[in-house]
Image: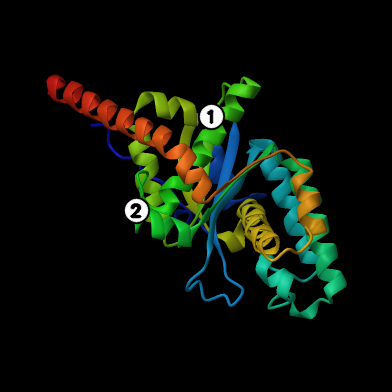
Amino acid sequence: MTASPTPVAYEAIPPGRLGGLSAFDRIARVLLPIGGCVLVLVEAYFDESCTHGGSPTMALAGYLFRQDQSEEMAEVWRRFLETKGLPFFHMVDCAHGTKPFDKLSPQERVLVETRLIGLVKRHTIQGLGVTIDLEIFKNRFGEKSFMGTPYSLAFYFITRGVARWAENTKYKGEIAYFFESGHGSQTEAHELVSIGLRVPEIRAQMHYAGHAFVEKAKSPQVQTADLLAWQMTKHLKNKALGRPRRRDYDSLMGHPHYIAHLGDESFSRLQPLWDKQRQSLLKRLEQLDRLRDKRK
């Protein structure tokens, strides 16, 4: 069996910008020495009380960047936040005016978000996002479904979105995958990537160059994914309550995005397909294991 990939650790490189580059950008250059694309993913829950207890919706969201655009956007993003006295951008804090956004007026917070949405639209290629109704998921499947946990299911959809984008654009290069470090699903994310990389076809569909875990507060690229995850879950909340669409959400959706929401109807419609694909994956893994054993 192919050894599990060892993700690059953000902590292995001193924090902050070194030689004009952030640690994030240095990792990206290690993984993509001759250029390519970067995909940054963040997991989030919609929870107005910020307790995450009983959160109704989970989101996995992120953006694809060309490597050079990733570096350029990160530098502009940081410099803009510095002019506002902000060490980082966190959408929920911006929306509710909590630290470090408490020193800004509501109008100023809107202007900050508007400027950053503009940078997202200017510097990213494609947004990718999946939301899952956790209550319906649990009532229907329990803790795990035919595709594993809600995170596993969301990650599957993201990788399918990457494959579809690459196919539609005839992209032949590599992609470096970045995940928020310290999150509860960090171990699961690494395991999912490791399983996928055992199958050459999946590795090719992912255009895999490597993966790493990075701190949100020090990585503007991760903050773009946080913005999208919050907007997606907030939109679902507003829709359920019959509220109008937010103008900032409309502005963000003016950029190319691949967005899916998984609820009861989606599970019913897609479960037969997922079951078939899961069985196909298991058979392929067994085949690869047999080939490995023959080579010993």
Q: Quadrant of the N terminus?
A: top left
Residue 106 % position (x, y): 83, 74
Q: Nearer the viewer, mark 2 or mark 1?
A: 2
**Image x and y of residue 95, in percent:** 73, 70
Q: Could you classify mark 1 by the number of other residues whose Cα lies within 10 Å: few (under 14), some (14-19), or many (20 or more)?
A: some
Q: Are marks 2 and 1 in contact (CB under 8 Å)?
A: no
Question: Which residue lies under the disc numbered 1?
Answer: 163
The answer to whether 207 is drawn above or below residue 44 in the figure is above
The quadrant in which residue 12 appears is bottom left
Give the label on residue 144, or none: 2
Colour pattern of the rendering: rainbow
Seen from the viewer's position, the closer of residues 13 and 158 is: 158
Q: Is residue 105 above or below residue 166?
A: below
Image x and y of residue 122, in percent:
79, 42
* Secondary element at tag 1: helix
The residue type indicated by label 1 comes to: Ala
Amino acid type for the residue under numbered disc 2 = Lys
Give neighbour class at mark 2: few <14, some 14-19, many 20+ (Cα, 10 Å). Answer: some
At horizontal 65% and vertical 58% (from top left) the residue drawn is 236
